[in-house]
Amino acid sequence: MRVRKKGWYDRGEAGLPPSMAQLAPRGPYADGWFALAASSELQRGKVLTRRLMGEDVVLYRSASGRVRATEAHCPHMGAHLGYGATVCGEDIVCPFHHFQFGPDGMCSKTGYGTAAPKARLLTMECTEVEGLVFVWRHALGKPSSWEIDTRSSVGFSPPYSTVRALVECPQDVIENIVDYGHFLPTHGIRAEIVEEPWFDGVRMGTTYRFHQAKGEKDAARVSSIAPKVKVIVQGIGVGYTEIEVPQFGLYMRTRFAVTPVDPAHADLRLTTSARVTKLGGGRIAGSLSPLVARALTGLFWYDTRKDFPIWEHRRYAQQPRLAKGDGPIVKFRRWSKQFYSVLEDSAGALNTEDATAHNEPPTPDA
C-alpha cells in the first residue's frame, strides 16, 4: 500500500491509491522534450522502462555509451522489452525470441540464425543534458524542432539528481514561475523582479531576487544579499536556473523537467550542481561543492512541497479573475499555445485547428 507523503508520491513504490488513479485529466499533452530518467540511472547495458503520456517507453544505453529510446513492445510477437531485454553492442535484444534491433529500429538478427524479417521497432529521439535523459514527443509524429540549451560544467560539481511524483500537468507547474503573487502567501518570500519576463520563440525567462518577507525598511538591506535567480524555460516542462550569492562565493545551477506520466500525474525531476569559491578556498571549496548541492536540493524540495497539495487539489481556471501583482499569467498562456498541436474534444475526436483554446483566458494582462 502506498504511503502518502504530504502531496507527493514516491514513484519507486508500486501503484497509486484507487482514489488517485481515478483523478480527472489535468490538461492536454504538449509537444516537446520530456525527461524520463537521470543519466546516472542508465549505465552501459542497462534497460529501463518509463511511463510517458500513458504509454511505456524503453530506454537503454549501448556499448558506446549512447542512450536510446524505443517503443515498449517488440514488433515480432509483442514482448515487452522492459522485462528482460538485454543490450548487445548498439542493439537491444528482445527477451522472447532474442530478435535484435539496431539504433535505427530495424531487425538485424533472430535468435535462431534465420534471416531477419522486415520488422522495425519504433525509435524515439533522445538526448542527455546536464544529467537528465530527454525524449522528444510530438502528437503528429513530427521530428524535433528545437534543441535543449546546454551549459559548461567547468567548476561545478557533478549533477545531483532527484525526482518527485506530482498530481498535476506540466503547464501548471511551469506557470508558477511567473505567478509572482503566490510567492509571499505560499512560500513566505518576496520576489524582487530584476528582469521582466520575456517570451521569445520556444523560450521564456525572468530573473528575480528572493528574500524573506520583512518590513519595508529591512527589504532593501535583505535584498542586497538575497540570491539572484535567473530562470529560463524551453517548451512546456524543460528549464534551468542559475542562482548566485556572490557575497558568500556560492553559485548553484539546477536543471528541472516536468514530465506527464498520465493525464493526472507528472514527474518533477531536478539536477543540482554547485560551485563554492569562498569556503576554505581551492581544494576544500571544491570538495564542499557536492555537499552544498545536496543540501540546497533538500532546501528546494522543502520549500516546493508547499505547492504540492495546491497542485493536487486545484482545478484549471480557464477564465482567471486576475489582479495587479499576479504576474504575466495571460502572456504565459498565450506563449504556451504553440506547444499543443492536438487536443481531444469531449467526444474523443482529435482537433488540430484550435489546439489550445483552453489556454486563452479572456482577461487583461496583469
Image (spheres, rainbow, N blue to C red):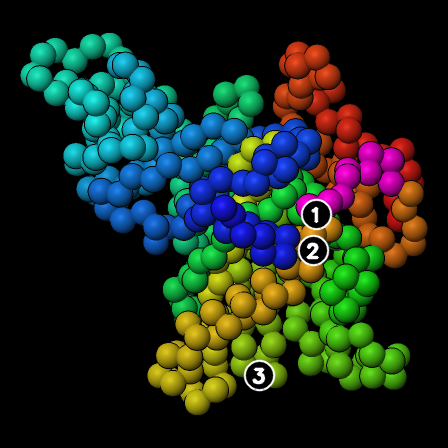
The label on residue 311 is 1
Residues marked 2 and 1 touching at CB (< 8 Å): yes
- Magenta highlight: main SS: loop
Disc 3 packing (10 Å; few <14; some 14–19; many ≥20): few
State the image coordinates of residue 285 (x, y, percent, origin top left): 42, 82
Residues marked 1 and 3 touching at CB (< 8 Å): no
What residue is at 88 percent from the left and 57 percent from the top?
A: 325
Residue under pointer 2: 307
Q: Quadrant of residue 355?
A: top right
Residue under pointer 3: 248
Residue furthest out toward the left: 113
State the image coordinates of residue 79 (x, y, percent, origin top left): 29, 22
User: Is label 3 or label 2 in front?
Assistant: 2
Location of residue 53 with respect to 75 vertically, above or below: below
Query: Which type of secondary structure does the marked residue at label 3 adopt?
Result: helix
- The answer to whether residue 94 is magenta is no
Is residue 54 visible in this depiction of the protein?
A: yes
User: Is label 1 or label 3 in front?
Assistant: 1
What residue is at 37 percent from the left and 79 percent from the top?
A: 287
Report the magenta residues as a range: 311-320
